[in-house]
Amino acid sequence: MSAFGTSENLRVLAQTCAIVVAGVLATAVAAAEPELARYKTAEKLAKAHIAKFDTLDFDVFTNQKWDRLHESHAKDIVVHWPDGH
């Protein structure tokens, strides 16, 4: 006989441990879901910002499409170039 008693006692102990572990894992997963959702939202927003920046930088600025400058600058924004103009 083992320290836990009969093989039936060992089986019940193993099942109990499995239930406890499953409960702990389920709680951890449930706790991580809101954080994962926030991460996915932030990742989607960052990708959209990078795509917009690429358009503004490579298309608007590089090609000097100043009529589209309002897409990145509000009317009350004053841009000063390094040379002062």
Image: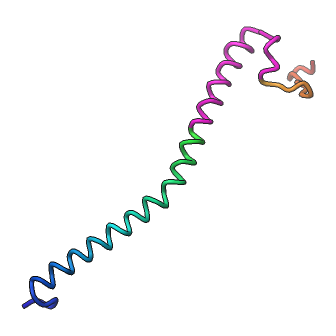
**Residue located 92% across and 28% down the image:** 76
- Rendered location of residue 53, percent (x, y): 68, 25
Rendered image quadrant of residue 56: top right
Answer above or below: position of 45 versus 69. below
Which is nearer the eye, 4 or 72? 4
Which is nearer the eye, 23 or 53? 23
**Residue located 21% across and 80% down the image:** 13
Main SS, magenta residues: helix
Answer above or below: position of 51 versus 66. below
Rendered image quadrant of residue 80: top right
- Rendered location of residue 66, percent (x, y): 82, 11
Instruction: Judge left or right: residue 19 versus residue 59.
Output: left
Rendered image quadrant of residue 15: bottom left
Instruction: Judge left or right: residue 13 versus residue 61.
Output: left
- Rendered location of residue 61, percent (x, y): 74, 15
Per the rendered image, the range of residues in magenta is: 44-71
Which is nearer the eye, 83 or 62? 62
- Asked if the stretch drawn in magenta spans residue 21, the answer is no
Instruction: Judge left or right: residue 45 versus residue 31.
Output: right
**Residue located 16% across and 89% down the image:** 4
Which is nearer the eye, 54 or 42? 42
- Asked if the stretch drawn in magenta spans residue 69, the answer is yes
Colour convention of the picture: rainbow
Position of the C terminus, as image quadrant, is top right
Answer above or below: position of 27 versus 14. above
